[in-house]
Image: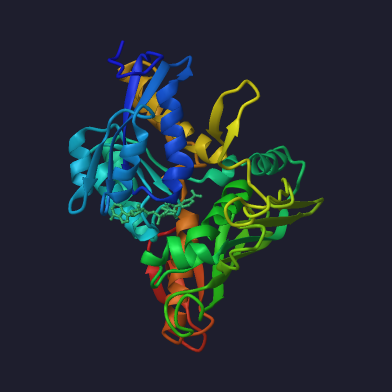
Amino acid sequence: MMENSGVRFPANHQLRAGMVGVGMIFDETYRPFLEAVHRQPFFHSAYGSCQVALAGIASRTGKRAEAYQQVAREKVTPFAVLKEPNAIDQLLDVGVDFVCIATPDNRHFSAARAALAAGKHVLIEKPSVLSLQELDQLVELAQREKVLAKIVYHKLLDPDHKKLQTFVADGELCHVNNGYCNLLEPKAISGGQFSEWIEGRNPGTYVAVHYIKLIDFTFGGRLKTVSCTGQRGLVGAHDGPTWDSIQLRLIYEYESGREAAFDIHTSWVTPDNFPGWVEQEVQFRFDNGVWNGHSRRRGVECTIEGKTPLDIKITINNHYSGSFLEPWGERSHRGYGVEAIGRFAHEVAMVEYGGDEGEREARLDEIRQLDYNELAADRQVVAAIQAMEAILARRAEGLEDCIVRINDEQGGLVLHTPGSAEAEVLYGPTV
Ligand SMILES: NC(=O)c1ccc[n+]([C@@H]2O[C@H](COP(=O)([O-])OP(=O)(O)OC[C@H]3O[C@@H](n4cnc5c(N)ncnc54)[C@H](O)[C@@H]3O)[C@@H](O)[C@H]2O)c1
């Protein structure tokens, strides 16, 4: 039985977790998971009980990690705070079994590469990486080091999306023809929380990726083309590289030879007092049906004088991450965002403790087959993001209406500019 520093329920296994980046998503998902599992380990008949100890947090300045250290006493095991430079190397020296990467999008790759090269399991926030070249390197490292490389796509764990997947898998909804998805974030995100790293960025990479994955995972098929446009002028110059809103279009082809088109609209300049806060809507049209989902209309509407809509949201998403007083008197913080982190910890526990050591590789292979969060299965999603970013970069340089074709005769990801016979190969191998 393991040593148990102040933990009330002794567990037969322990995993040491390392965190890189400690921003909003840490507070909403990792922190509630770590605090809950500190109070009570998780269980499975394959390995018994498993405790997760937060071993260290690597962050740029260490300020938020130190602030958490002050309030975290008793809530998690004592942990180290590691600051730049070389924060990730210091974290690896502390001794961890898995590393969670929640830095800004364009800083996922280097941290993930360092952790995988050191033989640690890795969980990366979406969007996993920004190019197929980076994805190839990470997948190769994970295979070489015999560890998991997984991504957090918590929207796939949203019960509404699970129901959509169930209807599609069971053939209740037949052949998707087209659809749209919207995700609108408030100005507080672009102007406050992300203002430090927003230069040259766009809201599509950050949030459209949720829906690219939902479409890719739920409907399958082969991604054929990516096109997009957007608007500028609020968070940056009207002709600069920083975008206010993005409209992305994906065309897929299915085994039947039939096609589908999906439009994904994202923004981070919605007024802060818009009641939806993070406004999310999807509609998919099938041969025999229509699926309409709306995160705001599915839930409650609450007004509290002096509090809503800024301190407390009018339309609260109680499904993703929320704190509750349970009917039996306990305080909890739960939701599908937290569940996604717990599920990854369970997958690591299955690999490490789910049977005989001699069968570890078989277990690793089995967990790698789970496409919903597997980095190796993220190829079409990363292709869509890489294509979108390339189109937006060309647009900022003055080239309009570019389109990217996937797996055409010239390469895996090929950018075509109207009026030019020359195509640019963004990624050579087959996607
Ligand atoms: N799964 C989801 O739905 C979801 C939701 C929100 C954010 N995210 C993703 O999580 C990531 C973080 O988002 P956030 O909202 O927490 O951002 P944030 O800006 O609130 O926090 C980012 C954190 O990373 C730290 N950081 C920056 N550079 C670093 C470096 N080089 N090394 C270590 N730490 C560094 C910053 O100091 C900050 O603490 C992003 O990739 C984002 O796309 C995912």
Q: Foreground: 316 or 43?
A: 316
In the displayed orientation, state which residue is furthest to the right.
288
Q: How is the image coloured?
A: rainbow
Q: Nearer the viewer, residue 202 or 416?
A: 202
Give the percent coordinates (x, y) of residue 285: 75, 56
Relative vertical location of residue 21 with respect to residue 386 in this rendering, above or below: above
Taking the spot 72% from the left edge, 40% from the top edge, the residue there is 167
Residue 261 in percent (x, y) is at: 66, 64
In the picture as drawn, the residue positioned furthest to the bottom comes out as 419
Q: Answer whether residue 288 is visible to the viewer in this image.
A: yes
Q: Quadrant of residue 336?
A: top right
Q: Quadrant of the C terminus?
A: bottom left
Quadrant in which the N terminus appears: top left
Furthest residue toward top:
1
Q: Is residue 426 left or right of residue 266?
A: left
Q: Residue furthest front?
A: 306
Instruction: Specify the quadrant of the image occupied by residue 122.
Output: top left
Q: Where 62 falls versus 91 (above or below)?
A: below
What residue do we see at 32% from left, 57% from top?
107
Q: Residue at x 55, y 76 (%)?
A: 230
- Whole-percent x and y of residue 146? 30, 34
